[in-house]
C-alpha cells in the first residue's frame, strides 16, 4: 500500500478522537473526553507502528493539539467544580496537574516537530546509492576532456613546449619543500 494512503487512513483516528472529545465535553462527561483523546492519539501511534507508515510532518503539531485537549479535560474534571450556588470554584491541585500535563505533552510535541524537520533535511538530500548511466565515451576522449577541464595549463602531447617561459627553482627556494627561499633584492 502506498505510504500516502496509509497516512491518510491514519488521520481518521485523531479526527474521530477530536469529534468524540468535543461531544463528550459538551455533554458534561469530562473524564470520558480525556479517555477518548488519550485513546485516539494512542491508537494513531499504534496504527502507524503496525502499518509501518512514516509519521507525517504535522505529527508534532497534532501532539501539541492533543496536549491542549487533554489538559483542558483534566482541568475541567479536577481543576474546577460547581458550588451549591451554581458558581464555579477553582481547585489549585487540579489546575497544577493540568498545567504539568500540558507542559509535558507540549514538550514531547516540540521534540517531534524538531525530529520531523531534521528528517525532512535528510529526505531532501540526494541518495548516495544511485548509479547514473552515462553515454559511452572512448577512454582517449575521456582523458583529454578530464585533463583539459581539471588542468587549465594542459598541454597536448602533439604541441611543442617552450620551456623558456617557465621559472625553475632550486631546492631550498620557493619549491616543493614548502620552505621559502632567500629573498632577492
Image: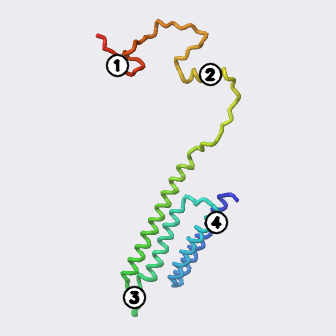
Quarter location, residue 148: top right
Name the residue carrying label 2: 143
Numbered circles on residues, count: 4
Helix, strand or loop at mark 3: loop
Residue 17 in the image: above or below residue 55: below
Q: CA distance from mark 2 to mark 3?
A: 89 Å
Disc 1 crowd, CA 10 A, few/some/many (<14, 14-19, 20+): few
Q: Quadrant of the N terminus?
A: bottom right
Of badges 2 and 3, the one in the foreground is 2
Q: Quadrant of the C terminus?
A: top left
Residue 139: x percent and y percent? 67, 23
Name the residue carrying label 3: 87
Residue 161 horizontal side relative to residue 52, left or right: left
Name the residue carrying label 4: 50
Asked whether the beta carbons under mark 4 and mark 2 sit within 8 Å of each other, the answer is no
Q: CA distance from mark 1 to mark 3?
A: 90 Å
Residue 47: x percent and y percent? 62, 67
Residue 109 in the image: above or below residue 137: below
Residue 126: x percent and y percent? 58, 43
Name the residue carrying label 1: 180
Please tell me which of labels 1 and 3 falls first in the chain. 3
Q: CA distance from mark 4 to mark 1?
A: 68 Å
Of badges 1 and 3, the one in the foreground is 1
Q: Residue furthest bottom?
A: 84
Residue 42 horizontal side relative to residue 133, left or right: left
Q: CA distance from mark 2 to mark 1?
A: 35 Å
Q: CA distance from mark 4 to mark 3?
A: 47 Å
Helix, strand or loop at mark 2: helix
Amino acid at each position: 500500500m502506498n505510504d500516502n494512503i496509509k497516512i491518510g487512513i491514519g488521520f481518521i483516528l485523531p479526527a474521530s478522537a477530536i469529534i468524540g472529545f468535543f461531544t463528550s465535553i459538551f455533554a458534561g462527561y469530562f473524564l470520558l473526553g480525556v479517555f477518548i483523546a488519550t485513546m485516539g492519539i494512542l491508537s494513531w501511534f499504534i496504527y502507524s507502528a503496525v502499518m509501518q507508515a512514516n509519521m507525517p510532518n504535522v505529527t508534532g503539531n497534532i501532539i501539541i493539539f492533543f496536549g491542549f485537549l487533554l489538559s483542558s479535560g483534566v482541568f475541567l474534571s479536577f481543576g474546577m467544580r460547581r458550588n451549591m450556588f451554581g458558581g464555579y470554584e477553582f481547585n489549585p491541585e487540579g489546575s497544577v496537574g493540568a498545567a504539568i500535563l500540558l507542559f509535558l505533552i507540549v514538550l514531547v510535541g516540540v521534540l517531534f516537530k524538531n525530529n520531523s524537520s531534521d528528517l525532512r533535511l535528510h529526505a531532501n538530500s540526494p541518495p548516495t546509492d544511485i548509479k547514473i548511466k552515462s553515454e559511452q565515451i572512448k577512454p582517449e576522449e575521456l582523458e583529454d576532456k578530464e585533463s583539459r577541464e581539471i588542468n587549465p595549463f594542459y598541454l597536448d602531447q602533439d604541441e611543442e613546449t617552450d620551456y623558456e617561459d617557465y621559472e625553475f627553482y632550486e631546492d631550498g627556494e620557493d619549491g616543493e619543500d614548502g620552505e621559502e627561499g632567500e629573498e632577492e633584492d
